[in-house]
Image (spheres, grey):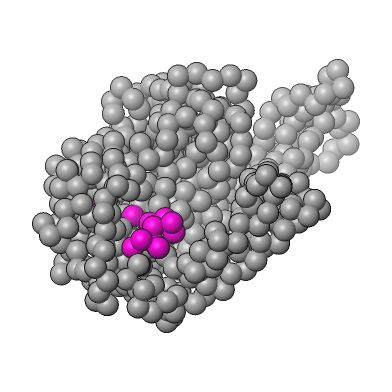
Amino acid sequence: MVFLRKVTTASGATAVQIAERKNRRDVVLEHLGSARTEAELAALMSVGRDKIHAGQEVLDLGLSQDPQSAVVHSKHSRLLVETLRAAWSVLGFDVVEDEAFFQLVAARLIEPTSMSDSRRVLAEVGVEPVHRNTFHAALRRCGEREYRDLIATRCFKHASTSGDISLVLYDVTTLYFEAPKEDELRKVGFSKERRVDPQIVVGLLVDRNGFPLEIGCFEGNKAETLTIVPIIKQFQARHNLADMVVVADAGMLSMANLNALAEAELKFIVGSRPKKAPGDLANHFHWNGDAFSDGQLIDTITPRHGSTKTETKRRRKEPVWDAKEYPGHWRAVWSYSRKRAVHDNYTLTQQENRARAVIAGDASVKGTRFIKSTKTGKKLDEESLEKAKQLVGLKGYVTNIPSATMAAPEVLSSYHDLWHVEQSFRMSKTDLQARPMFHHQRDAIEAHLTIVFTALAIARYLQDTTGFSIRKIIRTLRPLQDVTITLAGQQITAKPDLTDDARHVLDALTH
């Protein structure tokens, strides 16, 4: 039995399909399109009924068809497609002369899905998709013709002409695969989500506004600290750079990394671990105890190695870092925030209560903090708890930039720009759904990341230009469709009425 089937798509539209019931399953024979209004749905249902009943004998009663009935021929989200093509051109990505690659990027922006299903997404917005085999060929061309190099070069040019690339931000994320076993790239490794699936590690370098500059893919079991130097060196070599500041979180704080960055004559700002505070702030604790004022900054030094001896002479004034005077140290800036202290105190109280519950036998939690084992059993580690309470509200930063070049407040503000990288990762893992779940070979995975990287650049450009998120831009422009119909024997193209949000987007992009 052939019938019309309505399905709600991921974007909230209603897809209309001609299907047939076979072996207790619905087999789709033809996809007619997607509707976002009642009128569009009625038109698609009418077209579907006509197709199902085509060729069937009709009893001639001498009645003619209504000359005023309208037949929908095509729908085209012209404004959306033109917006994406304009951003593609402004960023200089048209250096990649590959329509299939552009279509894959556009589909990733409009409605992230599998490569095969991208043809449906493109057809729904009025773009005639290339053949499925052409998409596969585009993935091969991506590596063979070094599309990522071309895109990254254009990203750098855009960032350097519209912003500041003297300071770059770096962070990593993991993308997992629902695969039964590992291979040379997809390996089980450390997962913040505590997954045991094979994964890959992705490093992303952005400018201080979050615009992507470089992306890299590593084996899933590679330590995050071992990814930053290859990405930075790749970025330096590509653009022949010598002087720049790299900002990364505390996860990148390894002595080998800092030494490698310093040897490359690069400046860095990385987060410091709380356990460094007692040594770094020994003078402050000696003279002032654990008293801090909200927003207080302490500019001092920190040893490069655990074996490096710090100053033993107690001086009220903190030492001013200088590479020649303190060759075994880096500069350290510590800040105190009352708001952070409130949060830290709450966390410590929760951890202390959990530890007491474990000791009392009311809970059995592995790896609970502030518990130490003795011959008589478990007891509360009051000394460690007291030290932790002494450090609430403190956050440290390690850098090799002299205070004469960058004052302590600027060190903090530069580090806080890291949220732009996190925002870009969130955008790629939600709005762009970066996880390459349908790809298995390394070349295909690398090509997929190039598509995501390109889409992320377009998304950031549109977001920065309009003030709207890419999700809001898509939701605003996608329903606005040019509809071509036949009415009374004449073909007519009806253009959509612009909403206020649509006018805002289009005005922002044309000024």
- Number of marks in picture: 0
- Viewport quadrant of the C terminus: bottom left
Residue 30 appears left or right of 173: right
| Residue closest to the eye, 295 or 168 | 295
Residue 6 spot, x, y in % from top left: 77, 40
| Residue closest to the eye, 262 or 299 | 299
Vertical position of residue 285 compared to residue 74: above or below: below
User: Residue drawn at (62%, 20%), measured in percent from left and top?
Assistant: 180
Residue 358 spot, x, y in % from top left: 74, 52
Whether residue 443 is visible, yes or no, is yes
User: Range of the magenta residues?
Assistant: 268-281
Whether residue 118 is visible, yes or no, is no
- Viewport quadrant of the N terminus: top right
Which of the 4 image quarters holds residue 497?
bottom right
User: Residue drawn at (65%, 66%), measured in percent from left and top?
Assistant: 349
Vertical position of residue 322 compared to residue 446: above or below: below
Vertical position of residue 9 compared to residue 98: above or below: below
Residue 491 spot, x, y in % from top left: 56, 46
| Residue closest to the eye, 369 or 115 | 369
Residue 412 spot, x, y in % from top left: 34, 67
258 in magenta: no
Residue 54 appears left or right of 460: right
270 in magenta: yes
User: Residue drawn at (39%, 57%), measured in percent from left and top?
Assistant: 276
